[in-house]
Image: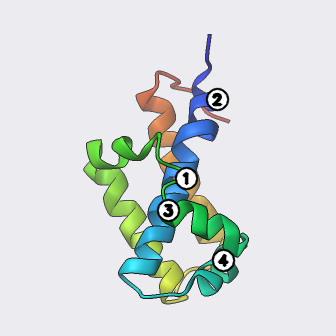
Amino acid sequence: MQFPCEIIVRDVLPSFKAFIVKELNHTYKLSQSKIAEKLGITQASVSYYLHGERGIIGSELIQKYPQVKEKLLALTEAIATKSATPDSLVNEICGLCTMMHEEFGCKKTH
């Protein structure tokens, strides 16, 4: 039996990060090292996301739920333009996670 949280951590959150990395690179033309710096991850991780070696399993969820894609696009813009605080970014990701928890049948979250 898989718990909704396991699916979120294993598949959904990495797909969110992959989406953000790809948007920062393709739309905002940021380098891998700049993306790594902004997200607090390694340049190698950015490369993995860009080349589809991480975060691909849950990527269909982003396409399936337009409201998730819209929030991720807004979040990416906030990251690129430095208009968001770390707390607001965490709150946005937590909100997206809550949406996905509900989708996977977990009505109560932490």
Q: Comparing marks 1 and 2, which lies closer to the viewer?
A: 1
> Dividing the image into 4 quarters, which one contains the C terminus?
top right
**Would you name the residue on which mark 3 appears?**
51
| Frontmost residue, 93 versus 80 | 80
Asked where in the image residue 49 lies, by quadrant, the reply is: bottom right
N-terminal label among 1 and 4: 4
In-image side of 101 versus 1 (left or right): left
**Distance between the alpha carbons at the discs numbered 1 and 4:** 16 Å
- Residue 4 visible here: yes
- Residue at (50% x, 66% y) in the render: 50
Query: Label 2 neighbourhood size at 10 Å, few (<14), some (14-19), many (20+)?
Result: few
Query: Label 3 neighbourhood size at 10 Å, few (<14), some (14-19), many (20+)?
Result: few
Three-letter residue code for mark 3: His
- Residue at (29% x, 45% y) in the render: 65
Three-letter residue code for mark 1: Glu
**Distance between the alpha carbons at the discs numbered 2 and 3:** 24 Å
* Res. 53 mark: 1
N-terminal label among 1 and 2: 2
Cβ–Cβ under 8 Å for marks 3 and 1? yes
**Distance between the alpha carbons at the discs numbered 2 and 4:** 25 Å
Picture layout, residue 61 above or below residue 41: above
Picture layout, residue 2 above or below residue 55: above
